[in-house]
Image: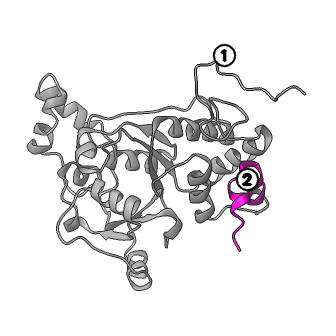
Amino acid sequence: MIDTSQLLDDVSFAKALLDKKSLSNADIVFALRNLLRMKYYPVAVKFFFSQSELDAFKKNTEYKVSAHPFTFCHYLAASRQRGDILLSPERGLGCSNAKYIFGWKGMDEGEVKSHLKYAKNAKQAEKIVTLKKRLPENLLAFATAPLHKSPYVPDVIHGMSDVLQAYHLGNDWSTAMDIFPFQMSMTMNSSACHGVTEVYLSRKPNITPMCSGSYTAGKTEQGEINWIWPGDQLEPTVRWMLERTVRDAGPSFPRTGETYPGFNMCKLCPFLVWTKPKE
């Protein structure tokens, strides 16, 4: 039987999850939804470089494939917003920028031309492209799935939220891992495909804005930002969020001790004050 009163009590909810030895993927998703008010599923991303691993996924998993080639952003959006488990070989990916990042095509004139709008000239556009991180060139396929339904251990977890929610996650990762400051990086274009690739290779999380492609192709009409985590680093991040929620009586940073986001009025405002009545 679900005790909804406990779910709505931040401290009681956090204590209940902390009683577990480790948080499940569903625990992580619900904690983010409940304490940080995140409305999208985090997406578990898997890169298949092993044929036997790919064969096992196909045999044991109910998944969907694209009817036409789609962008990587489309795959993320379908898993994030509809909860689909998706698989794509090279032929299922329609974005040339993502194909370059995933090692499914080489550098060519078209790739440089697509970056001219960001650059002063062709030489600078080529520099933008060549400095991007790329996966090894033996990728067989990639999969996306909502984290709580993921049939695999994710290589990378891709999420979308507003800036304040991402700020909380970044702070909590730094404290949980004892790594300061939280460093962010942004590329010209390729924010989602390069974003997951960079995190996969560096083993460090990133918070980065949408690029023009992901803004138009990735269902990001509300000004969301990408947060991208190594697959095994979201659990300790969320665990620390739960621990400080118990310690501070709420998860909010703007208003310490309050539920998220707290009454985020002007700091030290002397006018908006409530007190207990005097007898």
The question of residue 3 being in magenta is answered with yes
Q: What residue do we see at 50% from left, 63% from top? A: 147
**Drawn side of residue 78 relative to residue 45, left or right:** left
Q: Is residue 274 left or right of residue 95?
A: right
Judged by its main secondary structure, the magenta piece is: helix
Q: Position of residue 30 (x, y in %)?
A: 59, 59
Q: Is residue 194 magenta?
A: no
> Bounds of the magenta span?
1-17
Residue 169 visible? The answer is yes
What mark, if any, has residue 212 been given in the picture?
none
Q: Residue furthest right?
A: 279
Q: Is residue 83 above or below residue 168?
A: below
Other-residue count near label 1 (Cα within 10 Å), few / some / many at <14 / 14–19 / ≥20 = few
Of 276 and 130, nearer the camera is 276
Can you say which quadrant of the picture contains the N terminus? bottom right
Please provide percent x and percent y for residue 135.
34, 53
Residue at x-position 49% and y-position 73%: 151
Instruction: Give the amino acid at mark 1.
Output: Leu
* Residue in view at x 33 percent, y 62 percent: 78
Q: Looking at the rendered structure, which numbered label has been put on residue 268?
A: 1
- As shown in the figure, which amino acid type bears the numbered disc 2? Ala
